[in-house]
Amino acid sequence: MNLEGKIYYHGEIVEGAIEIEDGKIRRVKKSLPFAFRVRGIILPGALDIHVHFREPGFTHKEDFYTGSMSAAFGGVTFVMDMPNNSPKILTAQDFVEKLRLVAPKANVDFSLYFMLSPLSPGLEEINGAFKYYMGETTAVEGYVVEEYPKNSFISVHAELNECIRKESRDLRDHDKSRPESCEAMAVRTLLGKGKFHIAHVSGVDTVDMCKIGGFTCEVTPHHLFLHRDMPLGTWGKVNPPLRAKWMSEKLWEELLQGRIDIVASDHAPHTMEEKEDEFNIAPAGIPEVETYVPIFLYLVKQGKISMARAVEVLMERPGELLRVPKGKIEAGYDADLIVVDFKEVRKIRSRDLHYKCGWTPYENFYGVFPHRVYLRGEEIIEDYEFVGERLGKFVKISPAKQEEEEKEHMQD
Ligand code: DOR
Ligand code: ZN
């Protein structure tokens, strides 16, 4: 199958055609015979390396089918799912059982994290991706681990139990109960111990600490677009907490300047009933996976971020960090593509989204949603409608193997 139209290719928007064969991009040319012309601009699908689709154990909040369908509608064609499930994903058996459960429900490609624990070394043979919870949060107690699996991607929840207060009464107090300094301190303890990826950085000192350690880092949409003084109540309760407005503005600057590597959603849905509880009891977490790419594309339209930087932080860099052939329109890459028309701006409404939880803190924000989405060349969204069910496949993360391959290439 061939697609033609305006394509984001090597940093520019060009008129051209993409040849797709066996789910991969074979080549990009000025024109190709029998190409299907699309309206708008063709971009790579986004990679969200931080989602909580809640299987197994918490499927009343979300499940892999609804979560991955929401991802597709939001232009996300690959997700990495977190292991704070019930049971937690600690062993090979937990992992295989989870994979068996979720694979038939996946509407986009996916991979799964193990939860880092003293049991972890050796598990990288199964999948080289781990989540390291240094401190407590939803469904985890958090503990410090001293031995790490080799050649793996380790995403860190950097908060330490010793500087967390477990009670809080409102968003400002929640910020104080888990301060930025606690996050920076957690990252400091990792200096010199290996290579880590720091999840959801919420303060600029943390970003500095990441730079000192040679670590990569991600920022969430909520730490960029929401802040603790908005009238969100429990709907804005999240760990690490929303900070002051000035901090969200600084994080945006850090992202634009390239000091923060990527954006990942930390899609963490809870039901409305759970969130309607009193502040101290309501669980932390915000649903995000369907709205963040559209909001970013709207900001591109507004001139708040360049198209090049948006594509880097949403698509290209996440693919590079995991060393998967996704996130770029280039020969040899998976044909995961989204088509957007910047004239079609939509107001975000929770009733139009596909989450099981049925709410969003981004009500009335503007977004540019993809009107077509392709997963390895198969159309899964057409005219804003879902047309390709359950086509998602598991992607194994193996950074070590890839490194060896790179060395071989260099010797050629
Ligand atoms: O706010 C959060 N919610 N932070 C986390 O680290 C976990 C997440 C969840 O799973 O609900
Ligand atoms: Zn998370």
Image (cartoon, helix red, strand yellow):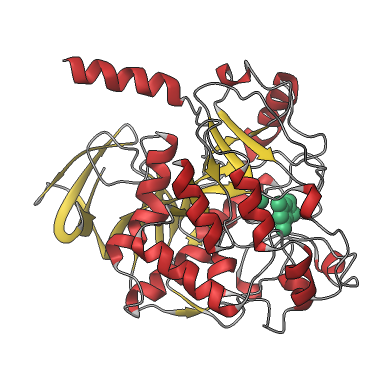
Residue at the (32%, 61%) spot, across then down: 309
In this rendering, the answer to whether 154 lies above or below 317 is: above
Query: Is there any visible trace of residue 137 in the rendered image?
Result: no
Residue 131's spot in the image, x, y percent?
64, 38
Q: In this view, does 383 lie to the left or right of 16?
A: right
Residue at the (32%, 31%) spot, across then down: 22
Residue at the (66%, 38%) spot, across then down: 132
Q: In this view, does 273 lie to the left or right of 107?
A: right
In this rendering, the answer to whether 277 lies above or below 195 is: below
Tell me the quadrant of the picture where the C terminus can be found: top left
Query: Is there any visible trace of residue 201 in the rendered image?
Result: yes
Residue 280's spot in the image, x, y percent?
89, 67
Q: In this view, does 251 lie to the left or right of 52?
A: left
Residue at the (47%, 79%) spot, across then down: 346
Q: In this view, does 18 lie to the left or right of 352?
A: left
Residue 380's spot in the image, x, y percent?
46, 51
